Amino acid sequence: MPSGGSDGGALEIVEAKTIKKIDNSTSTVIDPNGPSITCDTSAVTTTDDITYSSPTTHGAKTDLKLDIQVPRSSGKKPLVVFISGGEWVLADRTGNLDQRTYIADQGYAVASVQYRTTTSGATYKDALSDVKSAIRYLRANADTYGIDTDHVFVWGQSAGGYLAAMTGVTNGDKAYDVGDHLDQSSKVQGVVDEFGPANLSEIASDYDQAAKDGNYTAGNSAAQWVYGPGTTKSIKDYTSQMAAANPATHISSSTPPFLLLHGSADPLVSPSQTLNLLTALKDKGVEAERVVLTGAGHGDLSISANSDASPSTSSGSDGSSAGGAKPWSAKETMGYITDFLAGHID
């Protein structure tokens, strides 16, 4: 979640100085210091700037784009829809290219999608509808891109992880199917959620008071994500609107399997966010697994905070941690994702 100003409202996201240790006994804990992934871009065909939907928000139309990578091998490919993060104000579909290419190299069509943000006055409901529109578009154009429509997954990081989770838990909920290709299903067969928020009213619950105060500032981008533009409310209070924005509220028998991943030193989204979602999923009988990356921060391009759970990690000039380590791009970490995907293809 990069910092900075925007037309979408004040950004009061404050990195935590301390992160309390939580009980990870129900999760798999790893220390991904091994080799990073390598990618073979020559093995995939990439098509960029595909307009998949043109929704209107407060009278203004937005042409939403996606980029897709398809392996050049024969046969239909399972689809993975990637959703980037961006602090509710950005949705850069061009990011995480190495990680996306690595998944494509394993035999998946990988589509990275743009979605509406608070900069256009959108809320999470609009963005969720956008992700579902992209899924329907890709199913409608499956022959063009060589997609196996029976196996569609969503994978997101940070705000994108949140949207991936919401996409999964609202499987079959027609309230979020808006726009074109409504004859197609937006259901997904699995969710990969990397360090995504869930209950936004507790997004800073593991942090020091200064971080809590900053994250719960009234009217900030997170508040606008739930309540809409111009709100003077804070996400701190668990109102009915906050409950509706919580993936745990929507878990049902239609919810697909989940893989959740979080860094123990994440200074922007409390690690307990994915832990609590894991518990909620399991309590409802949904297959779910959580992987904790020891010492990892909020993605490979973030600065990790000092933490009771693990040592501080400083950022290098390219945004990676000191010594060049990129835990989120480690083969070990990415292996959990590829194993999850492969394990849910009949």
Image: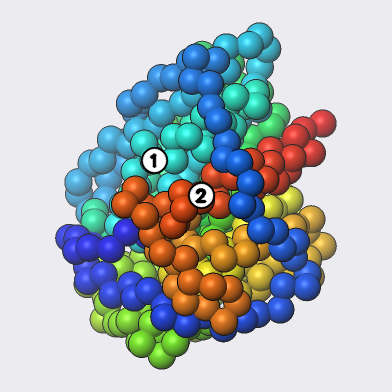
Camera sees residue 271: no
In-front residue for pair 246/82: 82
Q: Position of residue 127 (x, y in %)?
A: 41, 51
Residue at numbered disc 1: 95
In-front residue for pair 340/118: 340
In-front residue for pair 142/57: 142
**Element under disc 1:** loop
Q: Establish if 304 lies above or below 185.
A: below
Quadrant location of the C terminus?
A: top right
Q: Position of residue 204 (x, y in %)?
A: 47, 79
- Between the C-alphas of marks 2 and 1, the distance is 15 Å
Quadrant location of the N terminus?
A: bottom left
Which numbered disc flags the more N-terminal residue, 2 or 1? 1
Q: Residue at x 54, y 44 (%)?
A: 329
Q: Establish if 49 lies above or below 277.
A: above
Q: Residue at x 79, y 39 (%)?
A: 343
Left or right: 215, with 21 as reference point: left
Crowding near the residue tagged with mark 2, few <14, some 14–19, many ≥20 C-alpha atoms within 10 Å: many
Residue at numbered disc 2: 326
Is label 2 or label 1 in front? Answer: 2
Please name the amino acid that badge 2 sits on.
Lys
Q: Position of residue 193 (x, y in %)?
A: 59, 54
Q: Where is residue 169 in the image (x, y as percent from the top left)?
A: 63, 56
**Element under disc 2:** loop
Crowding near the residue tagged with mark 1, few <14, some 14–19, many ≥20 C-alpha atoms within 10 Å: some
Q: Residue at x 58, y 69 (%)?
A: 264
Please name the amino acid that badge 1 sits on.
Gly
Question: Furthest-top residue in view?
Answer: 74
